[in-house]
Amino acid sequence: MVSLKLRDLRKSFGGFEVVKGVSFEVSEGEFVVFVGPSGCGKSTLLRMIAGLEEITAGELLLDGARVNDVAPDRRGLAMVFQSYALYPHMTVEQNMGFALRLAGVGKSERRRKVEQAARILQIENLLNRKPANLSGGQRQRVAIGRAIVRNPKVFLFDEPLSNLDAALRVQMRMELAALHRELKGTMIYVTHDQVEAMTMADRIVVLREGLVEQIGSPLSLYNEPVNLFVAGFIGSPKMNFLPAGLLSRDGGRVELSLSPDVRLTIDDVAETGSAQALTLGVRPDMIHVADHGPLRGQVLLVERLGNETLIHVDAGIGSEPVTVSHQGQYAVSAGEAVGLSIDTRRIHLFSPSGRRVARGLQPTQV
Amino acid sequence: MRKSLAVRIANFVIGWSAAIVFFFPIFWMALTAFKTEPAAIATPPKLLFSPTMINMRAVLDSADYLHFFQNSLIISCAATLLAIILGTPAAYAMAFFPGGRTKDVLVWMLSTKMMPAVGVLVPIYLIFRDAGLLDTHVGLIAIYTLMNLPIVVWLIYTFFKDIPKDLIEAARMDGARPLSQFFFLLLPLTAPGFASTGLLSVIFIWNEAFWSINLTVTNATPLTAFIASFSSPQGLFWAKLSAASLLAIAPIMLLGWLTQKQLVRGLTFGAVK
């Protein structure tokens, strides 16, 4: 069953279009993440769904009914703000029960619902405190609790974890995922952090400059990005983009040159037009340091993360250094000359317009 | 932060000098109020004298002080309340739903305070005469409400501006309409702000003389007109005038003294945080 439907939603601020026609559906119980760089319109889109921003054009349907002009509270949605937005003069219990109080729910019923939500979030012992006396993580929980109490049709999260420190963010990420499983609620989550998107989402909506670039499951975006933007945005460290010249084409098979003495042959290439200059996309873990690799270069920087080693190599191809991700710890230091080999099983080829025209073999699921 | 001795001495000297310069006229008026008329105009001025209550008694005998006091109280409180009631929705809209011209509107509102009141005296007088508002409480309350509205809107606007927009949005999601937002959120969070706005407004109105003298005769005359009545016909009687002035400002001085914390907070809001 469809829970939320966006039909060509647009938003302009004084003649400047921020959301330029977005359409998709969110099914009941789904966890959808909007991701994109800052200024891509993801927060505006969320606020339009919430009812905090007016919809300039297009339609927003909630359970089949048009809600464009319905007041925020009448839409039956709940939002968790980046700043938590807890009412500073109210206790945790009053914060969580505020919506019920306004709706005229009786005191005992209110208390029961607040306690129930507090139990889920393990904040029962904080109910009498004021927000000022809570830690960042506790405030976050109260803000989520305030949403749970309302039993909303859709939970909306606007970058809720960005004010937390790294360790707490990882923990809250897991708790939110668990909460989604437990409540089975429909959730829409906005973030600029692709790791949050990858780890929590059922489906990711990648936005850029007010337009949807791609919608899909985390792994489908990772494995089959439709264009250079999505390929570069999803995955960390970022995919390497190497300029590749087209040498010859024979049906779907093309021969490319990365440098005068490095050539690659790729099958199943869709139409590339008449362009000679293509872009080869290779994820850092698909490039290996190999003494006799076809590419050669000088190590610029080594980042040792313990479980993996990131080696940035100036291979003389393109303007950016090539990033190599090596599992575990690897003995190499800046200034060394190394050889690199590309695993052609998982590469992507992009046309000059940025559209992906081919990829290597499917990765095998383990 | 520990300041050096020199800085502290300089602060002390400058602070006290400023305070003395500002306070001296009031101090001198208070002294004069308890002098005899000849002592009041003596040159060189006398600092030491035997105080007398004769002026106080004369002032209280010659005019019904309580009548004026009551008028001042009614007019300043009613106009303040009205200005706050009218100004709060405007401040709410401008603080939380600003448009492209909100800043211009705010500056324009304040700019009306720059115009000398005498410039509109004749039209206002004629309007008041034709509407039967001369020498009425309603008339003065109306003019003072309008006079203070820009300042009230500005002050409440700055207090509202200090409240994160997210809070209002969270309240909107929770189902709070503007009135609920005001009573459940804005009022509790900006109560000190409203208190200082109200106090300032009352003080401004209490001290206002131009309109009160020009638009009232006897019925609605506040204390400023009461003071003025001692200056004109029989020539200047400094001691009596001082006594009348002291009686007129005493209530508001007392109020200001008791609430100086809120007043300072109101006046420096936005400037010092």
Image: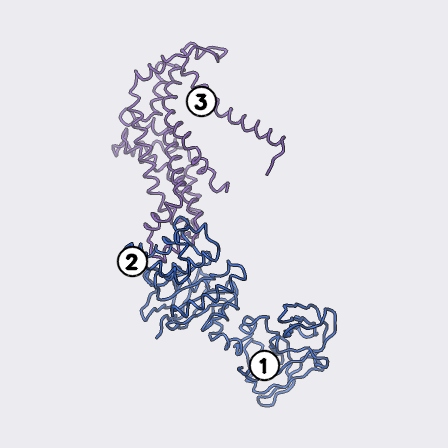
Chain colours: A blue, B purple
Q: Amino acid at mark 1?
A: Arg
In depth, the one of A359 and B102 nearer the eye is: A359
Chain for numbered disc 2: A
Using the image, determine if residue B180 lies above or below residue B245. below
Can you tell which quarter of the image residue B72 is in?
top left
Q: Amino acid at mark 2?
A: Glu
According to the picture, the residue beneath numbered tag 1 turns out to be A346
- Element at label 1: helix
According to the picture, the residue beneath numbered tag 2 turns out to be A109
- Element at label 3: helix
Tell whether label 1 touches label 2 (CB within 8 Å): no
x%, y% of residue A191? 49, 65
Q: Amino acid at mark 3?
A: Ile
User: Within 10 Å of the Cα at label 1, are there few (<14), some (14-19), or many (20+) other Cα atoms?
Assistant: some
x%, y% of residue A234? 54, 72
According to the picture, the residue beneath numbered tag 3 turns out to be B26
What distance separates the C-alpha of mark 2 from that of mark 1?
Answer: 57 Å
